[in-house]
Image (spheres, rainbow, N blue to C red):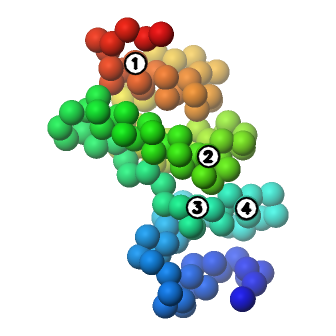
């Protein structure tokens, strides 16, 4: 197997004819956010290449149901990639990069403190309250 010394994982992936389409799309996604390999994050970057991130929040149809779907996939993605064990700075940046333009716009207008804006769980909770305003939270 070729090494990743040159930081060119996408070329390695694209040269393989045995990888499914989802891995190639993940490679494209990693290029879009300009991931570069460094010793401290290479494990999570490798996981990003194998597990595609959730699709952005879908605003067509039942938004409450669509949010629950996104939230469930976000949690699974976080666990599967090891992101759940990383710094909140990385979790927040990743979350905000994949929620989509409409959800990001809502996030920008939520009444959150700086501390809450830098905590992925707080962001998820605030968006959950936004998308499910008539439900009692326990």
Q: Residue at x 46, y 21 (%)?
A: 126
Which is nearer the N-term, disc 4 or disc 2? 4
Label 1 and label 4: CA atoms lie apart by 33 Å
Q: Residue at x 42, y 26 (%)?
A: 127
Q: Give the percent coordinates (x, y) of residue 85.
A: 72, 42
Closer to the camera in the image, 35 or 15: 15
- Judging from the image, what secondary structure is the residue with disc 2 in? helix
The answer to which image quadrant residue 92 occupies is top right
The circle drawn on residue 106 is none
- Judging from the image, what secondary structure is the residue with disc 3 in? helix
- Judging from the image, what secondary structure is the residue with disc 1 in? helix
Horizontally, residue 7 falls left or right of residue 93, namely: right
Residue behind mark 2? 79
Residue behind mark 1? 129
Residue behind mark 4? 43
Label 3 and label 4: CA atoms lie apart by 9 Å
Instruction: Kindly report which numbered mark, 4 or 2, lies closer to the viewer in this rendering.
Output: 2
**Viewer can see residue 102:** no
Which is nearer the N-term, disc 3 or disc 4? 4
Label 4 and label 2: CA atoms lie apart by 13 Å
Horizontally, residue 61 falls left or right of residue 70, namely: left
Which is nearer the N-term, disc 3 or disc 1? 3
In the picture shown, does residue 102 fall above or below 17? above
Residue behind mark 3? 48
Q: Residue at x 21, y 33 (%)?
A: 62
Label 3 and label 1: CA atoms lie apart by 28 Å
The answer to which image quadrant residue 106 occupies is top left
Q: Give the percent coordinates (x, y) of residue 39.
A: 82, 64
Instruction: Kindly report which numbered mark, 2 or 3, lies closer to the viewer in this rendering.
Output: 2
Determine crowd level at label 3: few under 14, some 14-19, many 20+ residues with C-alpha closer than 10 A. many
Which is nearer the N-term, disc 1 or disc 4? 4
Label 2 and label 1: CA atoms lie apart by 23 Å
């Amino acid at each position: 197997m070729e090494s990743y010394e040159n930081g060119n994982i996408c070329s390695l992936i694209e040269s393989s004819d045995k990888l499914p389409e989802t891995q190639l799309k993940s490679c494209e996604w990693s290029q879009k956010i300009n991931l570069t390999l460094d010793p401290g994050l290479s494990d999570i970057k490798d996981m990003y290449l194998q597990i595609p991130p959730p699709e952005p929040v879908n605003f067509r149809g039942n938004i409450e149901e669509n949010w629950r779907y996104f939230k469930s996939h976000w949690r699974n993605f976080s666990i599967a990639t090891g992101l759940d064990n990383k710094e909140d700075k990385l979790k927040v940046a990743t979350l905000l990069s994949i929620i989509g333009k409409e959800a990001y716009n809502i996030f920008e207008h939520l009444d959150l403190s700086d501390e809450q804006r830098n905590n992925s769980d707080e962001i998820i909770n605030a968006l959950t309250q936004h998308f499910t305003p008539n439900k009692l939270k326990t």
